[in-house]
Image (cartoon, rainbow, N blue to C red):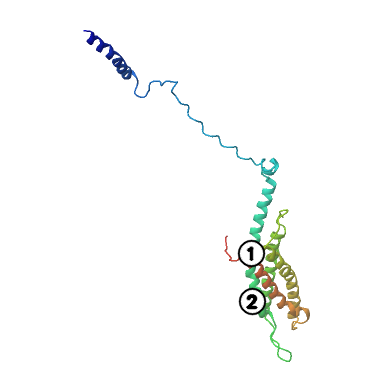
Amino acid sequence: METAAADEDQATPLNQQTLLNQQTPPNQQPASNPDNQQTPAKPPQPANEPSLSDLGFSQQQTQADPKMQAMLDKRTHMLKVHQKLGLFTAIPMAATVITGPLANAKGKNGQTIREPSTTNLDFHAALGGLTTGMYFTTAYYAIFAPKIPAVKKRGPIKWHEALAFVHGPGMIATPILGYMAYKQENAGEKVHGIASAHGAVAWATVGAYGAAIVSVSWPIRLKF
């Protein structure tokens, strides 16, 4: 009898533990002993990244400047127009120098002089006038584009602007000499004097203008 009672006393805690496990929801674990619980180590906090002020930039320097942005946008727009008009201007310019010989009188001293037809003279003069107008319109967009302070120009841009000191005066002198030559041709005279330099000045102008285009546009890609 004592043995049976002892066995019953030893079985009771097991039955209570079994009953406790049955009453505990499957998703809920029994509370663990707080004395044996280990607190997980906290990961090291990352160091604060330096701000722009830490790097020496003032708040005024880091803020957007709407006036400067507007200036940059206007300059970009005007220089794009300058580039496109410059390429278009090369077309009538080339046509003008190609038709130049058609507007010259043929023959030498002592020979019969064949004067150019009025149509040839007028056509050549019209091409020259169109070229001149387009050239100075193109130059306007470059000259009056807003200038960005403290920006140094280098490389092809410096060559492009240096060549403007050649084809710019050439585009002023060429129409003047051409008009003088035109008046002499209409008077039945062979072109003489300073007017005879009209063709040479025109070719020098075209050469410098073409070099200026190539200096900043090679390889040339047309985008409209």
Query: In which quarter of the view is residue 206 placed?
Result: bottom right
From the viewer's perspective, is 113 left or right of 28? Answer: right
> Helix or strand or loop: what does disc 2 sit on?
helix
Residue hosting label 1: 216
Q: Is residue 23 shown above or below 76? A: above
Is there a contact, CB below 8 Å, between mark 2 and mark 1?
no
Q: Is residue 209 shown above or below 66? A: below
Name the quadrant of the C terminus.
bottom right
Name the quadrant of the N terminus.
top left
Residue at 26% across, 11% down? 6
Closer to the chain start, of discs 2 and 1, is 2
Q: Is residue 35 shown above or below 171? A: above
Numbered circle sitting on residue 23: none
Query: In which quarter of the view is residue 157 placed?
Result: bottom right
Inter-mark Cα distance, 2 to 1: 25 Å
Amino acid on which the number 1 mark rests in the picture: Val
Q: What is the x, y in percent for residue 13?
A: 31, 14
Amino acid on which the number 2 mark rests in the picture: Ile
Q: Nearer the viewer, residue 109 or 35?
A: 35
Q: How many marks?
A: 2
Observer-side mark, 2 or 1, equals 1
Residue hosting label 2: 98
Q: Nearer the viewer, residue 183 or 8?
A: 8
Q: Residue furthest front?
A: 2
